[in-house]
Image (spheres, rainbow, N blue to C red):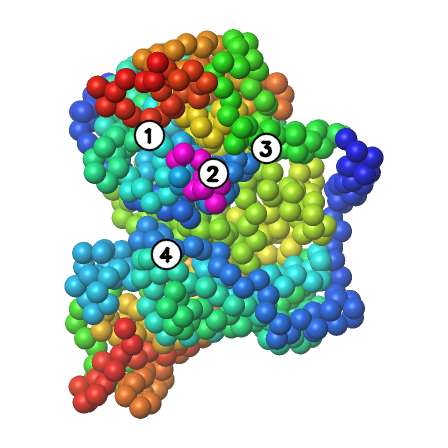
Amino acid sequence: MGETINRDLTAAAIDDARELIGMPLRRRPQYTSASTESLLRYAKAVGCRNAIYSDLAHGTLKTPWAALLGHPTSIFGFDNTIIAPKLPGIHTIYGGVKMEWFRQIRAGDSISASAKLTAVTEKVGKFCGPMVLQESEVEYFDGSGMPVARAYPRILRTPRNSAQAAGKYAGIQRHDYVGEQFMAILDAYRAEKVQGATPRYFEDIAVGDQLPTVVKGPLTTEDMNLFVGEVHTPYFFKAFVDHMKKHPADVYWHTDLNMPDTWDASLQQDAVARAFGFPLAHDTGIQRVAWLECMITNWMGDLAMLTLLDVRLELPMLHADTAWLLGEVAAVSIENGRAVAELNVRCENQRGERIASGMAKVELPSRNFAVTQPGLKVPEWFKANE
Amino acid sequence: MAATENDEAAKERTAHKARRVLTPGHITDEGIADLQERLGAYYQSGPYRLVVTADDIRANAVANGDLNPLFNDAEYAVKSRFGSLIAPPTYVDLVKHYTATGIGGLPGVHAFHVGNSVEFFAPVRPGDVIGPTYRPWKLSEKAGKFAGKMVSIDCEIVYRNQRDELVAIAHGEVFRVVRESARSRGKYANQKKEPYTDEQLKQIWKVAQNEEIRGKVPRFWEDVQVGETLGPIVRGPLRVVEISFRNWAGGGLLTGAGGMVYGGHFYQFEEYLRRPGLAEVEENTGVMDHPHRGHWEESFARKIGVPGVYDIAVQRTAWMTTLMTNWVGDEGWVRSVNSQFRLFNVEGDTSWVTGHVTGKRVEGNLHIIDIEISCTNQRGEVSTTGSGSTILPARAAGAVVPS
């Protein structure tokens, strides 16, 4: 009978993981080019209400970008940043990621990514004992080798201890939205605001301004289908058999069928999720990064550009949970001739628990002629209008 | 909020509370007459996909378990007679799904894709834009072992490319079945999950890892014997991710069956509220989820009488087509595939797809081989019957193979 392999964190396994540091990793991107369709699909997958990412005519004809734009987080289609090599039989928890963007993603762009592990650090976790933090760097380039974005994911590896987890999570069920709860969520969707074509000027914002709340949820199996399809390909049939033989510890064995399966089944099936340390089927983690980006891009307007987003995930998001995305302006400044707003952002679930938090930087348009437009690259010798 | 908006919201709250109780639809004479009136009329022309990309071609092939370099490796395919990467013939199922659920009607009455036939006329390449028309063709009432009174609907889809060339024609047949009676008739009531033995798994893996793709070596029509066998190729044991992410790994605005994709989060709920009877409220959460989630969620599959998460019919049509594309080689052409779905494949089922040559004929300068194809599961049951025809190169002068 096949048996799911759970291993301990040993010094030997950790040393073996360290050997990969600095070496280019073999990754499995969903896309090699950002087509109109793939960008529209991503927008649909995150429930996007912003015309600049979901309406071909809007971005192309009504903005200076003169194209359908991809969500900044659509870059996950070129490398999903879930980088957890080696340490077979050890659980993977997406801890968070810092992302920087150097230019917009447009329909028609060819994008490729290269990823490498940068650090493997032993830690002791508050809730789960010994852990290893794997940090990586992903660089995304366009067809001429120019940088588009960079991501620095942080992945936690902990022994699965599935029996222990089963005890800890016993009785956890999908949230039941009684009374008016679901209606309140629908009301929030209807009230969702997008700044869009009306510029949000740097001069008009202030520290303490709250970003309009955005809701994403309750998380359904269909949401998972849509998003996962944009960022991840499972192993199918023969490819799975080949993978399984090389990486037996990656395999979850269904006991009722004696059938092998992979960790991505935990995105849809509760039994598999429990074997990998979660109480129920759950999100990918990077979805919350994507939703926080939706809140920010809703607020910032068509002329602005998101240049930095750094998110830490704090608690799992399970099927039927709802994510409330909140944020505020933490600081405003002119940096190198650009008008920058720094934001504090967070994600709370339907129980009011904080499931993610972080910060972001946005370049905003300004009425001041001395300020460079968001995202605009100017030669060194350029002097703005005085 | 205006007065009318308050009324709308209040109506929705009432309707939503009512939907917490599972209310199946019914097959009524009025519903059938309404559908009858739609035959022959064009519905929802227009694709679910935009420009064909190399990424999506490769993803579609990979999701079918098809490692043919014609569909996966541009460097290889450029040197073939096609001059470029081409899509698996059944790629068109992502442009427009073969089934007739898009015409709506009979709210709350579930739909099962029971058969289809597809003819392939021209290859699909990166950069192509495929546009379909779609119309219901035929309607009849049936009674079956599975679910009592049923209605069968046939539809026709014609696919063209950006040069207005005919690419493919598909006919899809759907049975509309009341959900409650599906469960109570219990065709699958005695089917249980049986664990595989280690020996069975080894056998399956051996067939999987030895799947033969003929490739460059031509298979000449003259060399084929009636009775000759194709395959088997094996697909299984079937995992839920191989079902739910199949269409998505193929990319596109499609998941499950029937092209019913509205988008994440708000877009789903908006559509479900707009069309009462489309989606049921999950009893344990009070929230609606996709009406076709029997393709990835076991509790919903069981609710409608199927003993596990069940596969998507077009996957099987794709596997049967792979059997033929593997066999005809780079110089051959798969002209058509027909499938009749007799049994569901559920999570854990393994399909052996086999074929044998039933006929050799010449039509003008096309040298045709007819093949009977079936899928058999690990219980020895035939889940799918079908056939296909292929066009092969021939040593005879003037032989033509479409490219």
Task: Of the two numbered discs 3 and 2 on the same chain, state the one appearing first in sequence.
Answer: 2
Where does residue B394 sit, x and y in percent of width and height? 21, 84
From the image, tell me which residue sits under label 4. B52
From the image, tell me which residue sits under label 1. A103
From the image, tell me which residue sits under label 2. A62
The answer to which of A188 and A122 lies nearer the viewer is: A188
Q: Which of marks 4 and 2 is in front?
A: 2
Q: Distance between the residues labelled 3 and 4?
A: 31 Å
Q: How far apart are marks 4 and 2 (CA)?
A: 26 Å
Q: Which of marks 3 and 4 is in front?
A: 4
Where does residue A33 sit, x and y in percent of width and height? 31, 44
Q: What residue type is labelled 3?
A: Gly
Q: What residue type is labelled 1?
A: Arg
Above or below residue A157? Residue B7 is: below
Which SS does the magenta portion mostly show? Answer: helix
Alpha-carbon neighbours of circle 1 within 10 Å: few (<14), some, or many (≥20)? some
Confirm or deny contact between disc 4 and disc 1 (CB under 8 A).
no
Q: How far apart are marks 1 and 3 (CA)?
A: 30 Å
From the image, tell me which residue sits under label 3. A217
The boundaries of the magenta stretch are: A57-65
Q: What residue type is labelled 2?
A: Lys
